[in-house]
Amino acid sequence: MAVLAPQRAFARLSAALAPWALPILLVVVWQAAAHTGLLSSRILPEPWAVATAFWNLALSGELWTHLKVSLWRAIAGFAVGAGLGLLLGLLNGSSRRAATLLDTTLQMIRNIPALALIPLVILWFGIDEAAKLFLLSIGVFFPMYLNTFHGIRSVDAGLIEMARSYGLSGWALYRDVILPGALPSILVGVRFSLGLVWVLLIVAETISAQAGIGYMTMNAREFLQTDVVLVGVLLYALLGKAADWSARGLERHFLRWNPAYQ
Amino acid sequence: MQINPIEEKQVSRTVDQALHGTRHGVPLSLRGLSKQYGGRTVLDAIDLEIAPGEFVAVVGRSGCGKSTLLRAIAGLERPDGGQLRIGSGDGQPEVRMMFQDARLLPWKTVLQNVALGLADGEERARAALAGVGLAERAGDWPAVLSGGQRQRVALARALVHEPQLLLLDEPLGALDALTRIEMQQLIETLWTRRGFTAVLVTHDVQEAVVLADRILLIQEGRLALDQEVALARPRARGSVDFGSLEQKVLDRVLDI
């Protein structure tokens, strides 16, 4: 036992570190290649330079200003788009009449890629915040709408019948049976939307902006500051990962009854 | 007869008590009950009288209409013709249904499932869970229970409403043989103690002979057999009388 215990601890530690081995190796190779001059700093600055740039931007406060602007855009776009998607998904999922009236139209609009609307959006809204908000909202609307709609429609009819026979109806039926039954699907929509909101944000911010991570990155490109460009790219990656984490956290909390999420 | 509902309930309860102990089941009466699905007659003018507190088993081949009959009694299907009367007229009788699949809400704990549709029913739900021997599983999710335990929770959920008529739609069909025998004993015990009227749909003739006062056979939407089971409870599966009755009913089921 006394001999086995440290071995087991080592095995656990290496299992925890294993996923990070490849990224760390890549960074080491990258640093070595940049250091020996194999990799021009115009193409890719060394990791250390990126870290320094990150530090300096953080110290000067510039990083936080841009981060705050981008974060606000993402949250606002997500709230409007996913909120509307949720509402319409609930409406069309619950009411046949509403679905007949609205679903075909929504499906037609869905087939237009959000990014194909950029020229039109610029004509309508100019290059203001409104244009970005519109682009983000319309992009995240559909994954949310489709998954909510599908979730409500696919709630087990047997459970609804049972609940009705136990006297549940109206709001109680909705709260205790239909919504929780649709929740796994709704949360898939949340996850898709959260992933999509960053992609759309990157595009929206590189078109034209006076602040935000995209602006910071495009600005740095003009001055050939590849290190700052990389900081921007890394920030997007981190924010995307954070969004994914929070979506997973929501799933683990709301779907804790489901053995698949325990 | 002009008696106020409470008095009548007391009177009928006293009568029931004299007959069956503490029973308070309701009578059930079907007259010419019919149901069609797309031109096909599933129930063909069924006439049936069930006494308060009686345990009736309905057997038959798949698709004979026995489940439709039960669903019509439960109010889950609207009959196309005939009359259906539950209870002796006054007040809304308490009717509960147990399904083949337990139909527990997976996102509610065992206790919350039992308390479904009850206002402030937590204490009663706990007592009902204890009644089916699952008090210690109150806080668990249904997903971690076995099939037999889920059906026991479903039974507790039905019984917490103190049903006067309990409808059982092959609730033990998906269970293994041993669990099924345990569940049959549990249902019999609770029925003896509570005295509700019970209608059990099953394809297991032995189960019908174990539990029922009367066995009804449905063939092509009609009542083909109404067999009284006069064996003393609890019934020993191995006895000669049991075996011959089981064989008799089974022969009728198979003989079309």
Image: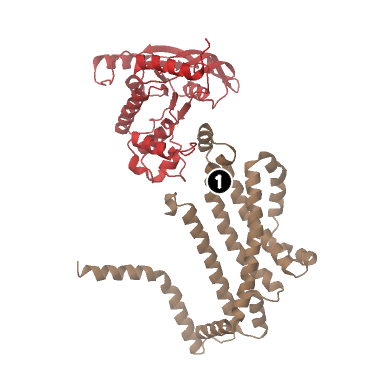
Chain colours: A brown, B red
- Front residue of this view, candidates B65 and B137: B137
Res. A24 visible in picture: yes
- Front residue of this view, candidates B244 and B98: B98
The quadrant the C terminus of chain B occupies is top left
Q: Amino acid at mark 1?
A: Leu
Location of residue B171 with respect to A137 vertically, above or below: above
Hey, which residue is sitting farthest top in the picture? B1
- Front residue of this view, candidates B208 and B156: B156
Q: Position of residue B192 (x, y in %)?
A: 34, 23
Q: Position of residue B71 (x, y in %)?
A: 51, 25
Quadrant of res A198: bottom right
Q: What residue does disc 1 label? A: A179
- Seen at 59% across and 86% down, the residue is A42
- Seen at 35% across and 43% down, the residue is B137
Number of marks present in the image shown: 1
Task: Please report, as a chain letter, where disc 1 is located.
Answer: A
Q: Position of residue A190 (x, y in %)?
A: 57, 57
Res. B86 visible in picture: no
Q: Position of residue A34 (x, y in %)?
A: 51, 86
Location of residue A159 with respect to A183 vertically, above or below: above
Other-residue count near label 1 (Cα within 10 Å), few / some / many at <14 / 14–19 / ≥20: some
Hey, which residue is sitting farthest right in the picture? A123
Q: On the rendered structure, is A32 left or right of B148?
A: right
For mark 1, give the secondary structure: helix
Quadrant of res A224: bottom right
Quadrant of res B179: top left
